[in-house]
Amino acid sequence: MRLVSQLGQNPRPLQLKATSFSAWHSSQVLRWKVENDVAWTQDVTMATKQSRLAMKGGLNLVDHSFDNVTIALLDDKGCARVEQKIAGHFAKPELEKLNVPVSLAGPVSRLLSKAKNAMGGKCEVFYAGSVAPIKSP
């Protein structure tokens, strides 16, 4: 993957564009804003034919460390189905246990989740960026 970027004193968001990717890949957006030596996510996501992943947080370009980074597998509303927090140095990242806000474990959990949504229960939207939800066949 070749990345094209502009760093420096430019206040515009940093645009990174992947010019090649694996065949399973459908689309991605990599939009960052660099402030005080940290590249903060503005709209960072990728989608396959079955899933969408999004990232929030920052990458410290001086210390080479993760700054409050969370990666999430998204549902069709942009809510996190599974979250993973990452901290520490790029060379030795510290991964927290997977957080599963909506249980994927069984039929009873799915039934309760559907009932909650039908009664107005809402999830916290993790991603509302430019990559649209995956359309079911």
Image (cartoon, grey):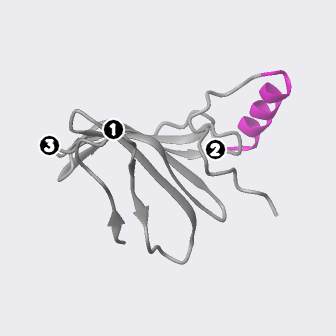
Local SS, label 2: loop
Per the model, the C-alpha gap separating discs 1 and 2 is: 45 Å
Residue 12: x and y in percent read 38, 42
Mark count: 3
Residue at the disc numbered 1: 11
Local SS, label 3: loop
Residue at the disc numbered 2: 105
Task: Tell me: residue 72, above or below residue 26.
Answer: above
Looking at the rendered image, the disc whose residue lies closer to the viewer, 1 or 2, is: 1
Q: Are marks 1 and 2 in contact (CB under 8 Å)?
A: no
> Which residue is at the front of the view, 121 or 68?
68
At a point 14% along the width and 43% down the height, the residue shown is 62
Task: Give the residue type that dot 3 points to.
Answer: Val
> Left or right: where does residue 120 sit relative to residue 68?
right
Q: Residue furthest left?
A: 63
Instruction: State the extent of the magenta-drawn residues as a range.
Output: 104-120
Task: Give the residue type that dot 1 points to.
Answer: Pro
Please tell me whether the stretch drawn in magenta is mainly helix, strand or loop: helix
Residue 62 marker: 3
At a point 62% along the width and 37% down the height, the residue shown is 79
